[in-house]
Image (tube, rainbow, N blue to C red):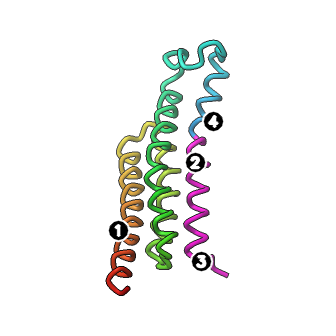
Amino acid sequence: MTLPVSAILLDCIAAAAVLIYLPFLVVGYARAQVGYDTAAPRAMFEKLPAYAQRATWAHQNSFETFMVFAAAALMAYVTNQDSSVAAIAAIAFVVARLLYSVFYILNVPIARSLMFGIGSLSSGTLIVLSLLSANSSLGNG
């Protein structure tokens, strides 16, 4: 049994939302190690080890990219994208964003940048597919 593309799009939005917080688990672990300061949690950033600082940046970047992806996936959803290209693009975004955070935390900049590019290309693909579909349906109406 295969999922319809509409379900894949929605599942990928949900997965991408969860992935925003994955790097923050690493930050939480590091904060516990250095002694969490509830009075000034942001002030302790400089005290964090380098991997936790990178995890913070990965967490912040995940918010930024999620907005574009969620819009792109919802555009694909409302334009009834049912192509395997749309499904692959949505899944590729989720996988790329997972690996992006891993590579960022592990300090592998080339791989991190590649994953950022794949994620951006995936969102762009969904946007283009949606616009093509919407514009072709306008011409046929």
| Mark 1 or 4, closer to the camera | 1
List x then y, in percent, for residue 136.
34, 81
The C terminus: image quadrant: bottom left
The N terminus: image quadrant: bottom right
Residue 140 in the image: above or below residue 119: below
The crowd level at tag 4 (other Cα within 10 Å; few <14, some 14-19, many 20+) is: some
The image quadrant that residue 112 belongs to is top left
Q: Judge left or right: residue 1 versus residue 137.
A: right
Q: Which mark is residue 4?
A: 3
List x then y, in percent, for residue 8.
58, 69
- Residue nearer the viewer, 110 or 4: 4
What separation in Å lies between label 2 and label 3 (alpha carbons)? 22 Å
Q: Amino acid at mark 3?
A: Pro
List x then y, in percent, for residue 12.
57, 61
What separation in Å lies between label 3 and label 1 (alpha carbons)? 20 Å
Of mark 1 and mark 4, the one earlier in the sequence is 4
Residue picked out by circle 4: 25
Q: Residue furthest front?
A: 141
Of mark 1 and mark 2, the one earlier in the sequence is 2
Residue drawn at x 44%, y 48% as measured from the top left? 65
| Mark 3 or 4, closer to the camera | 3
Q: Which mark is residue 19?
A: 2
- Residue nearer the viewer, 17 or 98: 17
Of mark 2 and mark 3, the one earlier in the sequence is 3
Residue 50 in the image: above or below residue 75: above
